[in-house]
Image: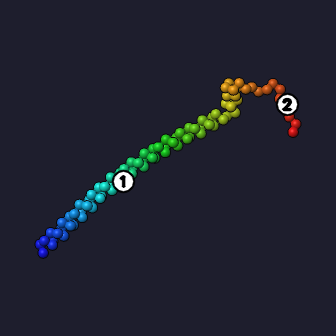
Amino acid sequence: MKWGAAAVAAILLAGVVASGVQVVARTHEVRLLHQALEASRHHQDRLAAEHSRLLLERGARSAYYNVEQMAQTKLGMRFPDRVERVPR
């Protein structure tokens, strides 16, 4: 009977050790996943900030005055001296 109790104790000890190793492995995995999540959130924040800047730039560039200035300076366009209405 002594051997039976020792065998049961050894099996239980092995189970506790295996369970402990699994807990450590899962904890490490959770930490890695949390780190990846934080990196993704940081990347998302940077992209959102860039998107906001691009929207502001698009709005600024599409303002009428800026379009007219670009047409004159970069494309050499000018408003015609005489404007005529074309009948349809």
Q: Residue at x 33, y 56 (%)?
A: 26
Give coordinates of residue 88: x percent, y percent. 87, 39
Q: How many marks?
A: 2
Residue occupied by mark 1: 30
Q: Residue at x 69, y 26 (%)?
A: 75
Kindly identify the amino acid type of the residue bearing the numbered disc 2. Glu
Kindly identify the amino acid type of the residue bearing the numbered disc 1. Val
Dot 1 or dot 2: first in sequence order is 1
Q: Which mark is residue 84?
A: 2
Q: Residue at x 86, y 34 (%)?
A: 86
Left or right of 28 in this view: 11: left
Q: Secondary structure at mark 2?
A: loop
Say if residue 69 shows up in the picture: no
Give coordinates of residue 38: x percent, y percent. 42, 47
In the rendered image, which quarter is residue 58 located in? top right
Give coordinates of residue 64: x percent, y percent. 70, 33
In the rendered image, which quarter is residue 62 located in? top right
Left or right of 88 in this view: 46: left
Picture layout, residue 3 above or below residue 59: below
Give coordinates of residue 50: x percent, y percent. 53, 39
In the rendered image, which quarter is residue 8 located in? bottom left
**Label 1 packing within 10 angstroms: few (<14), some (14-19), many (20+):** few
Left or right of 24 in this view: 45: right
Picture layout, residue 11 above or below residue 24: below
